[in-house]
Amino acid sequence: MSMVGLQTTVSRSHTAVMSKATVIWWSMFACSATALATSCYLAWASYTSSAVAGCSGGNVFDCDHVLHSRWSTVLSIPVSIPAIGTHVLLLSMLMARFVSKRWEDLRWTAIGFASLSAATAGLWFTGVQVFLLEHLCPYCLVAHVSGFLLAAMYLINRPAHGVSLKWIGGAALAVVGGMALLQSVGAAPETHKLEYHPKSQPSVEAPDADGLFLFEPPKSASLPQTFWTPGQIRNQLVQATHRFAMLFSPQMALSGELTNADEKPKVNSALILNNVKLETGFWPLLGKPDAELVFVELFDYTCEHCQKTHKAIEGARKKLGDRLAIITLPVPLDAACNPAIKVTDANHLESCLLAKLAIAVWSVDHDKFAEFHNFVFEQKPKYAAALIKAKELVDVEKLTATLAGTLPSEYVAKHIALYKTAGSGTIPKLMFPKTTSVGAIESADLIVKMIEQHLR
C-alpha cells in the first residue's frame, strides 16, 4: 500500500472514530439535559405544592400518587434534588476538556459515576412505581429512561485506560442503595395537602343575599327523597290526624305531638370553595341534617386513598358524635360517566355503577344509606354483590324503579360538576369553607383537628 493510501485509510478511520464519539457525546448531552429539565420541573412542583400537568385523577399514570408517597423524598428532601445535582455534574463534565491525561481520566470517572448512578436510581424508582405504588409518573419515567441510555452510552464509549468499571459501578450502587435504605426506614410523609381558595365565582346558581352560591341538586330531585320511609309515613299520618282534629277542636291541635308534626325538619348547610353552599337535606348524608359541623367529601368507592380516608372519617364521627355530618358525593374515576377521566384504571371499571347504586339507596331510604356506604367501603364488593346488599337493605321494587330512572345519573353528573369546579385531579377531597384537603388521610385525630380548625 502506498504512503498516500495508508494516510487516507488512517484519516478515514480517525474520522469514523471522531464521528462515533461526537454522536455519543451529543446523545449523552441530550439525555442528561432532558433528565435535568424534568427533575427541575418535579422539584418545582414539589416545593410549590403544584399539580403536575397531565397525569392526575387516579389512573395508572398518577403523578400525585407517586410524588406524595414515602418514596418521593429522602431525609425530607425531594429525590428530584439529588437528581438535579447528578445531571449538573454530568453536563459539566461533558462540556469540560482537559489536556492532562490524569484530569481526563478523572473527568470520565465522574461521567461514569453520574451515568451509572442515574441508571441505578432509575431502576430502583421504576421498580417502586410498578411493584409498590402501582401507579406511574411519566415525568419520572422520562428521567429514568434517560439514565438507562446514559449508562449504555458510557459503557460503549468508556476509555480502556479509565478507572476500573467495578469501582465506579460499586460507588454508584452504594450511593443509591444508601438512599433507598434511608427511604425504607424513614417515616412516611403525609399523603394529603391543603388547598386554599380565594373568593371564587363558580358556575352555579346566582348568589343569595349573603353572596353565597347555592349548589342545587338535580331538578328532578326537588324533593330530597323519591319514596317515603316508615318515619315519613308516620309523620304524614300524624299531620292528617292534626288536620282532622282542627275540624272539631282547634285547641286539641295546639298541644302535644300534633303541633310538632307540622314543623319542618331542621337542616344545616355546608360552605365550600369560599362561597358555595350545599344544603344537607338534598344530598347523600352521613349524620343528622341539623348537625353543628358539616363538610363535603368527594370520593370514589373503588379508590384506595378514599378507602383509607373512610376509616379515618368513621373514627372522627365516633369522636364527634351527632355534632358531625358529612355530605358524601361519589365521583367515579371512570371515563364511562366522568369526562374528566381520560383513561379508566382497571380498579375503577365499576365505579359509575357503584356510585349510582349508592345514590339510589339513599334516595329510597335515607336511614339505610350509612350502612350501605360503610359496606361498600369496607367489603370492597363487585357491583353484583353490592346490588344484593342494597336489595337486603331497602325495598326492592323502589330500588329497581330508582335505578331505572334518571335520578342516579343526574346526581353523579352534579357531583362531577362540583369536582371540576374544585379543580378535578386527586381524590378524596374533604371540602371546608376556605380550604380543601386533597389526598388520603389515615388519622381520625387529624380529621378532628382539621374540623376544629376549618369549621369553627
Image: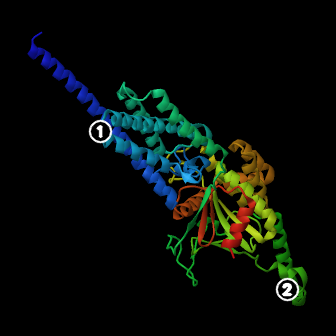
Percent x, y of residue 421: 52, 65
When asked about the image quadrant of residue 433, the answer is bottom right
Identify the image's colour scheme: rainbow, by chain, secondary structure or one colour.
rainbow
The kind of secondary structure element at disc 2 is: helix
Type of amino acid at the residue the image marks with label 1: Phe
In the displayed orientation, state which residue is furthest to the top.
1
Asked whether disc 2 touches disc 1, contact meaning CB atoms under 8 Å apart, the reply is no
Question: In the figure, 128 relative to 41: above or below?
Answer: above
Residue 98's disc is 1
* Horizontal relation, residue 188 to residue 35: left or right: right
Label 1 crowding class (10 Å Cα cut-off): few <14, some 14-19, many 20+?
A: few
Percent x, y of residue 266: 75, 77
Question: In the figure, 239 relative to 178: above or below?
Answer: below
When asked about the image quadrant of residue 381, the answer is top right
Question: Can the viewer see residue 330 in this picture?
Answer: no
Q: Could you say which is closer to the camera, residue 183 or residue 295?
A: 183
The kind of secondary structure element at disc 1 is: loop
Q: Residue at x 69, y 76 (%)?
A: 456
Q: Could you say which is closer to the camera, residue 326 or residue 31?
A: 31
Residue 246's disc is 2
Question: In the figure, 83 relative to 25: above or below?
Answer: below
